[in-house]
């Protein structure tokens, strides 16, 4: 298939150079990958085999300019593999995982290429490099060393085999979870099965049935549907059935069971770390992080675990007492927690989700998130109907600065569907850089909100609204990037810093200035009453013991799993039970992500042994927002300028700790985290 006939390879003429989604067919992907891989191999060979004396430009610069075709094909394919997949795309994904791993490993284990980089690195102090060039050189030198460059040939061959196998396992793991989520449905028959469900949830369960070509009402394993079902359903038997199905994703015993995959992944990661000279995989992984060591990450998790567990036990006592008061002769179990917590919140704060939701329209929360960005950073989002999208649900927005100059393109993909993996994330179809021209970013936010009934707006929970702000925080990190070299662009920062811009952005949702303007009733247009707003803000730390224990237990199991020096006979279920017993996990609580469906950790290596990073970044965001509070204005111009310059626009131009200090003026203060979560003594 020629470049002219393959839209993935031909020039893209749509506005903003957006991918021509309508022209792309499944059969285009493999030929496009093959052609782009061949081109990239030739580019790498040209650099590695050069007889010229190594310089920054003919080695590092050339390396940064290579791979554009492959990046373009891969960005389209993998974005759609996550957000709009099918069996054919999944088959290509399984085929390409080891091929792409083999390709990238061959690059980073190419001794001739590394010798050229190493030669430039050795004389870096005499080259008059810019700060950004020096950062690129240092990061690549480290990346090649961490990949195994310069090691004996037998070690390199084993490292390559491990990487290839891990790529295949990660792909299969994620597909197994998606297939489990797609295949499970619980039919709600009649009014008895709908008992306790508010109107918005009845509509959402009907919409889910319609989306799957069924009649009536159903519950699926989409988080936006199952969590509110657990929160409101008066049918304890149905809550238990749904919760156990949610908990059992990835361990059903059939073709989608992930437990053997986990054991192999943990063993291969440990072996790779030892081949590279590290004690454990966690030591290898965290060597390039803000934390620096597993011990530092573990200290943070344990410092939060104790007060969180104490608070969770108090919360459980309150729920047990409430159940008894309501005449429910039960012992509160994991599938009961959200149900009684919702009633406890109503009792304690005269507040429930059904009262809040009419004021939290999806479209208005999108407006609020965009307006916050405008007030902080002077940018504007304008919807564009002339830009190609990959699904009818997707919306496209042009982003411009205060002078009307284009910043980039933003896609919002907000609704749950069976072709989309669960959760919420930000990604890029194209990252910002200046090395190959003034390249503007194309950023996407993907979420899984339950769609409103036909003709009705989609209403969000407050947690949903927070998720939307969180992902736009990531999106702004990509959109506002202002770097020359692709390596340093946008969110390409160490893992325990990448959540800082997104978690910081969540704070603006909770500010009265924002809620008073955008939290308006979907029928009357009236703003949320002050009394309701006050109760909402007063309840911000409600159930935080539960939320923190759910998260920290997951992070502890992840870290402990990757601290193993011996993985012989590893069993994920037994290991999970062992760690939870050691930390004395509160009764009626489970991890937010159990190993068989822990996609952060096992669908690739993004958060492997680094799930703690959300909490590490939360220390930064809690202390960081205090800068605006201290300035007396949540949109203070000077504070926002420093935030943009040193964080949102800076990419990975400098060490994360220095970037934070340049913004804040001091190192982060951990006590802000406990205050934020209501866990301070």
Image (cartoon, rainbow, N blue to C red):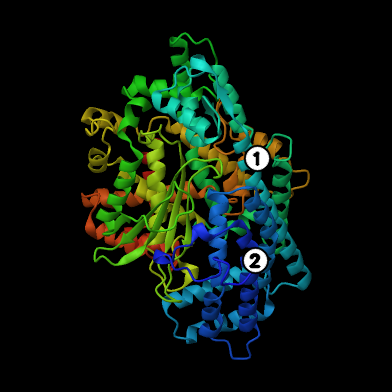
Numbered disc 1: secondary structure: helix
| Tag shown at residue 31 | 2
Numbered disc 2: secondary structure: helix
User: In the image, residue 615 lies at what x, y percent?
Assistant: 47, 46
Q: Residues within 10 Å of mark 1 (few under 14, many from 20)?
A: many
* Image position of 346 with respect to 147: above or below: above
Visible in this render: residue 310?
no
| Tag shown at residue 160 | none
Q: Earlier in the sequence, mark 2 or mark 1?
A: 2
User: In the image, residue 272 lies at what x, y percent?
Assistant: 70, 59
Q: Residues within 10 Å of mark 2 (few under 14, many from 20)?
A: some
Instruction: Please report the residue visible at 46 percent of the width from the left and 29 percent of the height from the top.
Output: 228
User: In the image, residue 108 lies at what x, y percent?
Assistant: 64, 71
Instruction: Please report the residue visible at 71 percent of the width from the left and 41 percent of the height from the top.
Output: 259
Quick one: 48 or 560, which is closer to the camera? 48
Instruction: Give residue 132's quadrant in the image.
Output: bottom left
Instruction: Please report the residue visible at 25 percent of the width from the left and 31 percent of the height from the top.
Output: 534
Visible in this render: residue 248?
yes
Instruction: Give residue 293's quadrant in the image.
Output: bottom right
Residue bearing the label numbered 1:
596
In the picture, measured across the screen, residue 609 lies left or right of residue 373, that is right
């Amino acid at each position: 298939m020629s470049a002219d006939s393959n839209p993935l390879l031909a020039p893209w003429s749509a506005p903003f150079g957006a991918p021509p989604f309508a022209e792309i067919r499944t059969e285009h992907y493999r030929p496009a990958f093959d052609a782009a891989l061949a081109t990239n191999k030739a580019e790498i060979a040209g650099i590695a085999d050069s007889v010229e004396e190594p310089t920054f430009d003919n080695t590092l610069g050339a390396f940064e300019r290579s791979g554009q075709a492959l990046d373009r094909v891969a960005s389209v394919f993998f974005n759609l593999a996550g957000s709009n997949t099918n069996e054919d795309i999944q088959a290509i994904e399984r085929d390409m995982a080891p091929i792409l791993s083999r390709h990238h490993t061959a690059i980073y284990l190419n001794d001739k290429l590394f010798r050229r980089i190493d030669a430039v690195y050795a004389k870096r102090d005499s080259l008059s490099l810019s700060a950004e060039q020096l950062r690129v050189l240092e990061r690549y030198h480290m990346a090649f060393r961490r990949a195994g460059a310069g090691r004996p040939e037998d070690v390199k061959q084993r490292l390559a085999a491990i990487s290839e196998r891990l790529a295949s396992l990660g792909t299969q793991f994620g597909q197994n979870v998606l297939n489990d989520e797609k295949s499970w449905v619980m039919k709600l028959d009649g009014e008895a099965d709908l008992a306790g469900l508010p109107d918005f949830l009845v509509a959402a369960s009907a919409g889910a049935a319609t989306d799957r070509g069924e009649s009536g009402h159903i519950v699926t394993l989409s988080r936006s549907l199952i969590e509110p079902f657990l929160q409101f359903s008066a049918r304890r038997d149905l809550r238990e059935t749904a919760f156990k199905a949610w908990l059992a994703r990835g361990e059903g015993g059939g073709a989608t069971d992930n437990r053997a995959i986990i054991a192999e992944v943990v063993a291969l990661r440990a072996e790779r770390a030892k081949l590279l000279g590290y004690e454990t995989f966690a030591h290898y992984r965290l060597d390039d992080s803000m934390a620096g060591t597993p011990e530092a990450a573990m200290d943070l998790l344990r410092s939060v675990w104790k007060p969180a567990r104490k608070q969770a036990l108090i919360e459980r006592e309150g729920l047990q007492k409430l159940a008894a008061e309501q005449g429910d002769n039960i012992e509160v179990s994991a599938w009961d927690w959200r149900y009684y917590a919702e009633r406890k919140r109503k009792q304690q704060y005269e507040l429930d989700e059904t009262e809040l939701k009419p004021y939290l329209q999806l479209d208005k929360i999108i407006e609020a998130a965009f307006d916050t960005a405008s007030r902080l950073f002077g940018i504007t989002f304008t919807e564009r109907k002339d830009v190609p999208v990959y699904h009818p649900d997707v919306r496209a927005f042009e982003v411009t600065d205060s002078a009307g100059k284009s910043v980039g393109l933003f896609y919002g993909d907000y609704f749950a569907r069976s072709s989309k993996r669960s959760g919420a994330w930000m990604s890029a179809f194209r990252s910002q850089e200046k090395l190959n021209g003034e390249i503007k970013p194309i950023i996407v936010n993907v979420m899984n909100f339950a769609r409103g009934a036909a003709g009705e707006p989609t209403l969000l929970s407050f947690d949903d609204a927070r998720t939307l702000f969180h992902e736009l925080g990531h999106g702004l990190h990509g959109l506002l990037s202002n770097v020359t070299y692709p390596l340093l662009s946008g969110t390409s920062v160490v893992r325990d810093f990448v959540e800082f811009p997104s978690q910081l952005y969540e704070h603006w949702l909770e500010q009265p200035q924002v809620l008073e303007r955008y939290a308006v009733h979907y029928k009357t247009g009236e703003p949320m009453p002050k009394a309701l707003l006050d109760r909402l803000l007063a309840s911000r730390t409600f159930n935080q013991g539960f939320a923190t224990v759910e998260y920290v237990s997951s992070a502890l199991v992840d870290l402990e799993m990757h601290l193993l020096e011996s993985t012989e006979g590893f069993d994920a279920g037994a290991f999970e039970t062992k760690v939870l017993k050691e930390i004395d996990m509160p009764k009626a609580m489970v991890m937010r992500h159990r190993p068989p469906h822990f996609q952060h950790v096992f669908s690739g290596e993004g958060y492997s042994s680094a799930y703690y990073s959300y909490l590490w970044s939360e220390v930064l965001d809690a202390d960081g927002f205090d800068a605006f509070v201290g300035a007396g204005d949540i949109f203070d111009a000077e504070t926002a300028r420093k935030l943009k310059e040193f964080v949102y626009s800076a990419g990975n131009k400098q060490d994360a700790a220095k970037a934070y200090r340049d913004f804040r003026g001091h190192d982060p203060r951990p006590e802000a985290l406990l205050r934020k979560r209501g866990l301070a003594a």
